[in-house]
């Protein structure tokens, strides 16, 4: 069952996070941009309010929440109402697929990653950004998830677990980068983006079909 209730109920509260935490947001945006292919032929799965797709020049998004789609439309994103487990695209049509933090709200990662693999062209890239469960912020979110409007329905994953699912879907050639090295309340400038993972709370993985 789609985990969209809090996003339909509190769309503006969700979108306000990016304003309150603008430097953390810009840090995540930079980390993704550094891994994103130059091709314009891509789609974001779980595009939300378009906070990543719009500045990254991605014109197409998949989003099951009607209120999130409403916000994305204002950012000039073409939207498709569907789930990651059932992508309404032909096989092998995209150069890249982006997914940012949506993994923790997906019901079936196995099926979703296989769907993404299917719609990518040969040598296509899957870029996935998420909060590492084993990081400082990941552990904090996990500890307090029951008191969060959004994260009480979320499942957080370690980098190793995400790689496990990527390999299971036949992805290969993984490239890792990380950012967000301080508590959110302490971030008052754009954080560095470093190679690898294990220190930063926000991790980006680029995988190849």
Image (cartoon, rainbow, N blue to C red):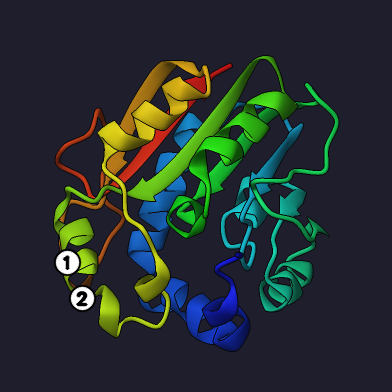
Q: State the residue position of label 1.
A: 140
Q: Is residue 138 above or below residue 20?
A: above
Asked whether the viewer can see residue 187, the reply is: no
Asked whether the viewer can see residue 92, the reply is: yes
Q: Is residue 21 above or below residue 205?
A: below
- Report which quarter residue 119 is drawn in: top right
Instruction: Pick out the residue farthest to the front.
Output: 1
Measuring from the top left, give residue 126's x and y in whole percent.
56, 30
Q: State the residue position of label 2.
A: 144
- Report which quarter residue 176 is drawn in: top left
Could you classify mark 2 by the number of other residues whose Cα lies within 10 Å: few (under 14), some (14-19), or many (20 or more)? few
Identify the residue at image location x=27%, y=79%.
146
Identify the residue at image location x=40%, y=83%.
149
Secondary structure, mark 2, is loop
Frontmost residue, 162 versus 55: 162
Q: Are marks 1 and 2 in contact (CB under 8 Å)?
A: yes
Q: Distance from label 1 to label 2 (Cα)?
A: 6 Å
């Amino acid at each position: 069952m789609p985990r969209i209730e809090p996003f339909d109920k509190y769309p503006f509260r969700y979108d306000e996070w990016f304003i309150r935490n603008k430097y953390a947001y810009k840090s995540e945006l930079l980390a993704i941009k550094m891994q994103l292919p130059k091709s314009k032929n891509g789609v974001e799965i779980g595009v939300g309010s378009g906070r990543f797709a719009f500045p990254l020049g991605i014109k197409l998004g998949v989003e099951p929440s009607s209120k999130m789609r409403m916000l994305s439309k204002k950012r000039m994103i073409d939207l498709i109402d569907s789930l990651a487990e059932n992508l309404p695209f032909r096989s092998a049509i995209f150069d890249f697929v982006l997914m940012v933090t949506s993994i923790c709200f997906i019901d079936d990662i196995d099926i979703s990653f296989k769907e993404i693999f299917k719609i990518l062209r040969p040598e296509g890239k899957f870029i996935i950004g998420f909060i590492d469960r084993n990081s400082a912020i990941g552990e904090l979110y996990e500890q307090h998830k029951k008191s969060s409007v959004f994260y009480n329905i979320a499942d957080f994953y370690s980098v190793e677990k995400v790689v496990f699912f990527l390999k299971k879907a036949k992805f290969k050639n993984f490239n890792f980068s990380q950012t967000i090295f301080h508590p959110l309340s302490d971030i008052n400038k754009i954080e560095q983006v470093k190679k690898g993972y294990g220190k930063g709370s926000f991790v980006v993985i680029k995988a190849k079909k």
